[in-house]
Amino acid sequence: MKVGVIYARSLNNVIGDKGNLPWHLPEDLKHFKETTRDCVVAMGRKTWETLPIKPLPNRTNLVLTSSSLYHPEVITSRSILEATNEAFYRRKDIWFIGGSNVIKRALKVADTVVVTEVLNNYEGDTTVEDLADEWKMISKTSHRSNTGINFNILKYERSDNYVSTNTC
Ligand SMILES: NC(=O)c1ccc[n+]([C@@H]2O[C@H](COP(=O)([O-])OP(=O)(O)OC[C@H]3O[C@@H](n4cnc5c(N)ncnc54)[C@H](OP(=O)(O)O)[C@@H]3O)[C@@H](O)[C@H]2O)c1
């Protein structure tokens, strides 16, 4: 079972602004759909609230929250560990898709990270930290959107010699 983190960030590490993505990148949305198809997608409660289509189709939607959320097609979890267990029971890969706290905590247990690097700076109220040294880039592809924005898709795996001591 794969535990992945997937997100898009700008050069200045912005991932969101006022509940939205600061850019329009249809090609990245397509890449996101293809990567996470048939998997569990785990997201923070605020990200869930901002989704234009709920739940995201063709994948198991899981919302992280300390409260209750009633939706017939959605699983809720109270921690990253509980979320990974839910995916494990379903024998599915899980992708943590944001926002910032979810990414930060999920990076402690993930084995794969996929980052869309949007090659501009943006203003925003939600950011991520740089990836730590334990992440080794295994591929990089460069793209130009029809909207004129350049972006890279970066794939990382954990370095072989890294031993996690974290709990979540
Ligand atoms: N660029 C990207 O790839 C990307 C991806 C996703 C989202 N975004 C953007 O990011 C912004 C939203 O992100 P955000 O960081 O503000 O909020 P968020 O992570 O989506 O939601 C925060 C909420 O999620 C719950 N939560 C988070 N971590 C948890 C944990 N470990 N255990 C249990 N519950 C947890 C809490 O809900 P309760 O308060 O209910 O307890 C918390 O208040 C939006 O602008 C969105 O567009 C960007």
Image: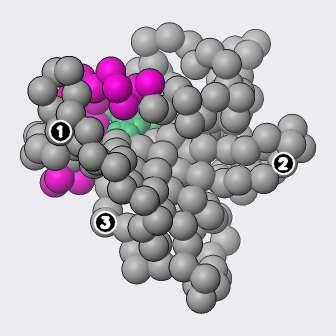
Is residue 25 shown left or right of residue 137?
left
Q: Label 3, secondary structure: give it.
A: loop
Bounds of the magenta segment:
11-30
Magenta span: helix, strand or loop, mainly?
Answer: loop
**Where 109 sits versus 86, above or below?**
below
Q: Is residue 14 magenta?
A: yes
**Where 96 sits versus 16, above or below?**
below
Residue underneath mark 1: 150
Which amino acid type is marked by label 3?
Asp
Chain-order first, disc 3 or disc 1: 3
Which amino acid type is marked by label 1?
Asn
- Residue at coordinates 15% horizontally, 32% vertically from top-left? 149
Which numbered mark, 3 or 1, is in the foreground of this view?
1
Chain-order first, disc 2 or disc 1: 2
- Residue at coordinates 54% horizontally, 67% vertically from top-left? 157
Residue underneath mark 2: 88
Residue underneath mark 3: 130
Q: CA distance from mark 3 to mark 1?
A: 20 Å
Is residue 149 shown left or right of residue 40?
left
